[in-house]
Amino acid sequence: MVNERMFAPLFRGRLRLSVGMGAHLISISLIEILTAIRTRTIELSNHRRQQEGIGSVAPADVYYERRDGIFQPREEQKRVTLEERFRYNRSRSQEINLGARSPKP
């Protein structure tokens, strides 16, 4: 990620970037840097970040019609998890109920 603290102020149309022990003059314009940042932001938003409004998938997954392939494993995992929770909660409930119904002396 580009951090504004990495760059010194503009120096005659160039940026001075601190690298290691010294400062090196690089020949890259501010517009090129901003374009790279914008490109990275768009790539992150479209391909990596899941959007809740479209079913917690990335917009690129919807565009390239991969959404169904993503939902099938999720639904299977959800089903397995709910079954495990149900079995666990039922066994805990029986343990608690059995413990409460112990015969009185």
Image (tube, grey):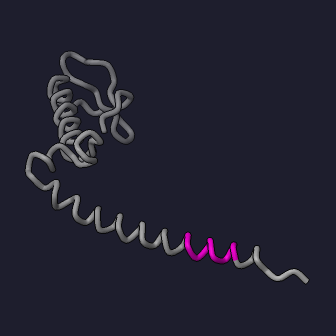
Residue 68: where, in percent of width, then height?
16, 58
Residue 24: where, in percent of width, then height?
27, 33
Q: Quadrant of residue 26?
A: top left
Q: Is residue 92 magenta?
A: yes
For the magenta stretch, what is the residue range?
89-97
Q: Say which quadrant the C terminus sits in.
A: bottom right
Q: Residue at x 24, y 25 (%)?
A: 15
* In the depicted structure, whether residue 29 falls above or below residue 96: above
The one of 30 and 44 positioned closer to us in this rendering: 44
Furthest toward the right, the residue is: 105
Q: Is residue 38 magenta?
A: no
| SS assignment for the magenta stretch, majority | helix
The one of 96 and 30 positioned closer to us in this rendering: 96
* In the depicted structure, whether residue 66 falls above or below residue 1: below
* In the depicted structure, whether residue 19 falls above or below residue 12: below
Relative side of 58 to 101, left or right: left
Relative side of 53 to 83, left or right: left
Q: Residue at x 28, y 27 (%)?
A: 16
Q: Say which quadrant the N terminus sits in.
A: top left
Furthest toward the top, the residue is: 12
The one of 81 and 70 positioned closer to us in this rendering: 81
Q: Residue at x 29, y 68 (%)?
A: 76
User: Across the whole image, how many numbered discs are drawn on residues?
Assistant: 0
Residue 104: where, in percent of width, then height?
87, 80
Residue 98: where, in percent of width, then height?
70, 78
Q: Quadrant of residue 82?
A: bottom left
Q: Residue at x 9, y 45 (%)?
A: 63
Q: Quadrant of residue 18?
A: top left
